[in-house]
Image (spheres, rainbow, N blue to C red):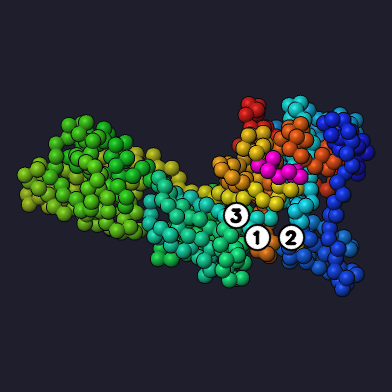
Amino acid sequence: MSASVPPPTEFGARSDGQSVAPPVVLEHSRAPERMAADKVRCDACPVLCQISPGKLGACDRYGNVDGVLTRTDTVHLLKRPGSEAVEWKALQAGSWDGTLVDDAPVFVSGIGASTTYPDYKPAPFIIASRHQGVDLVTVVTEGIFSYCSFKVKIDTDRYLGPEQATVRHRGEAVGHVTTIEYGSQFLSLGGVHHLTGGSKKEGRIACELMMALGNQQAVDLQIEGGAALTLQAGRAPIVDGVEEQRMRVGCGSATVGIFAQQWHGHVDEVVVVDDHITGVLSEHQAGKCLDMPPTGICLRGRKSTPGRYFQVANPGGGWGGTDIEDPLSIIEGWDATRGARPGLRLLMVSTTGEDSAWFVLDEALVPQPAPMPAAVKRVVERIGENCEPSLASVLYVAGAGGSLRAGVTDNPVRLTRSIKELLVNVTCGGAPVYVWPGGGITVMVDVARMPAASFGSVPTPAIVSPIEFTMRLDDYRALGGHMSRVRRLEEVLAGSDYRVVDAPAGNPWPLRLPGAGTP
Ligand code: SF4
């Protein structure tokens, strides 16, 4: 079913009123003469598959259907939360009177949209729509990205492996361990080095891993000299076969600061064991503010500032991300001349509260295990209560500042500048992105905010992922956009070659421009 859509008069016209002829663009290069007549050639990526009748290309994204090169999936339209499907069903039914819908009920995403490759080709969908009465254009494509990677944040205080260690998937190097941030270990996975700089197998395995991560599937990884991991976006990480439960409440010093007042009066000393910064309450500024007397405790490791110790043990799978199973092993002794005395009450606890022990010093100043008082136990439980659930978060980083821009405009640097000037809303599958400062268009997006199965791949190898650029119609004209290729949203809806999916909940509506201040 299709409605007759009047040709848009303003598109294909210059701002000075002169009409311009559509650019002469050879969309497809000529197939080789020796190719069998019943084959079709796909030039959506540099592999240039020659596809036999009824077969798929090497990436399964295109097939030969009755002699026609056909995308196996179709473009995904995201339905605006709260919009009534009836709005666009009327359009589908062909009863559209030509009036533009003031608030577009759907957003044309790059998922299934096809690519701009070869790069002189305008983007497959350049769509005019309206949001709150404002005329917009969204340039929609699936980018083929060799320069892309995933940054994975793993909420855990467990030691996963040394910084810079190689991360392997099915035996191949696919990334490395990077920094630890507050309560989370970061990994960098994929990237052009692994896709193109190693063996063919390394590139293929890295690409498969990246696609699975982006599509929110579980992947198994092994860190050299470290842990075996199972990671899935938005799920608890599994470390050496054990599902992580809690993200630590803070480092040892922070934990002392948070709970000092609640311990006061119930303890003489607290040691919060942490691989990075172990806290000692009586020496810590928090203890000083509570007038806690010194206890003569002598801790292993390197003293930083009062009550804060580095390197009390080696990293590992024990208490607080250290390798210790016996917490007393980090105490060198007790100094009676500095406050140690029989009967002194000592709590040792980890930064998640998962490990804790209560001791009382005997006559020889040796800590003896004892039942933990209820008031102390309550605070230990509160540490656990304040820990957030441990999650693996997967962020996709991709460079869109190259030839992909030619699908948007004949003057690519203007797109880059317009994005930096916040005139353009960049989205990936309708999900909001962070655009890195500096040169290029380097975007970062949380894959959990993208629709399911947003990522594909081609065997070059490279990742295929959706990207959309939305801006005011006037701004698109000003940056040298392919105006003769602009189609109205209503025109797309009047056809049937699309799939409507719900926009993931919680995302800002992608037609909202930066700084527009509208929902
Ligand atoms: S790998 Fe896929 S996109 Fe590339 S040419 Fe073959 S079918 Fe087309």
Q: Position of residue 187 (x, y in %)?
A: 48, 55
Task: For mark 2, give the secondary structure.
Answer: loop
Q: Is residue 412 left or right of residue 268?
A: right
Instruction: Check residue 148 in the rendering and tell me which mark sits there, or answer none.
Output: 3
Determine if residue 301 is in view. Answer: yes
Q: Position of residue 170 (x, y in %)?
A: 54, 68
Q: Residues within 10 Å of mark 3 (few under 14, many from 20)?
A: many
Q: Which mark is residue 120?
A: none
Callout 1: SS: strand
Q: Amino acid at mark 3?
A: Cys
Q: At label 2, which amino acid type do we have?
A: Cys
* Amino acid on which disc 1 is placed: Ala
Residue 384: which quarter of the image?
A: top left
Split into quadrants, the picture shows ligand 1 in the one at bottom right
Q: Is residue 110 left or right of residue 274?
A: right
Dot placed on the residue nearer the N-terminal end, 3 or 2:
2
Quadrant occupied by the N terminus: top right
Q: Position of residue 77 (x, y in %)?
A: 75, 43
Please tell me which residue is depicted at 85% across the width and 54% down the height of the picture. 26
Q: Earlier in the sequence, mark 1 or mark 2?
A: 2
- The response on whether ligand 1 sits within 8 Å of label 2 is yes
Which residue is depicted at the point 60% across and 63% down? 195
Residue under pointer 2: 45
Q: Are dots 1 and 2 in contact, CB under 8 Å?
A: yes
